[in-house]
Image: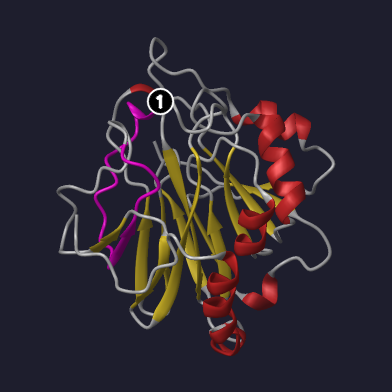
Amino acid sequence: MKRRQVIRYAGASLLGTLGVLATSGKERYYAQSRGSVSIQWLGHTCFRFSGDGLRVLVNPFRTLGCTKGYRLPKVDANLVLIGSQLFDEGAAENLPGNPQILFEPGVYQVHSRQFQGIEIDHDRVGGRRFGKNVTWQWTQGGINILHLGGAAAPIGIEQQILMGRPDVLIVPVGGGPKAYNPQEALQAIQALRPKIAIPSHYRTQAADPAACDIVSIEEFLNLASGFPISRVGSDTLTLSPGNLPQNETAIRVMSYRF
């Protein structure tokens, strides 16, 4: 793993962390007034975000179990964000170029912008089985992004304050022991009230039938039928601040090019 950045909130008080966030409020306001971000789904919880001259890759994986039939996400990126480092997750080795890698909770200044890693349990037993998951929050192309990775525990009050209200929320929906099931995903969406929610971590044709314990996207969509839902029909979605929903959460389902 690459050297960590110097600004961190790990171990600091919530008040101190909010102070760091407040100092960047003016910069975030101006950043949100322009630009766009392109979001590419690379399978499972792996996405690449491109905009403002920066490419951010989140949660590259190894191909086994639920990801067996996906292609390895070996794509160009300036920065790689890792949510967890289990055997099938956090596979940042052999990526092209020499991207910087962040994998621990904290507040970091990278490429003249702030990235915040917020810790949440990766299971439903206080992290005793699969440890902790790092959710990542940052602003790119004027869009406030929150990637929940493999969150499995309810979002606490302090976590919710740190996460704020995202423009785009990447939320796991397929269940299993390491991430939200459809009901838990819906609760997270209701708590965070994002403008757009993009489901991740669900069963597709990539899954090894003998070694994948998550459910399909349809179980979540049936539960979330009260929200406006649309299928993008592509693995890439481009958003700008001006084309975000304003009054309710829209769910966007992305496609994978098998």
Tag 1: Cα neighbours inside 10 Å, few (<14), some, or many (≥20)?
many
Question: Percent position (x, y) of residue 140?
Answer: 49, 73
Image quadrant occupied by the C terminus: top left
Question: Would you say 110 lies left or right of 176 here?
Answer: left
Q: Quadrant of residue 250?
A: bottom right
Question: Would you say 97 lies left or right of 108 here?
Answer: left
Question: Percent position (x, y) of residue 175?
Answer: 57, 27
Picture layout, residue 180 above or below residue 58:
above
What residue is at 66 percent from the left and 38 percent from the top? 185
Q: Which residue is mark 1?
A: 66
Residue 75 falls inside the magenta stretch = yes
Q: Secondary structure at mark 1?
A: helix
From where the camera sits, is residue 66 visible?
A: yes
What residue is at 37 percent from the left and 64 percent from the top? 56
**Part of the protein shown in magenta:** 66-85
142 or 177: which is nearer to us? 177
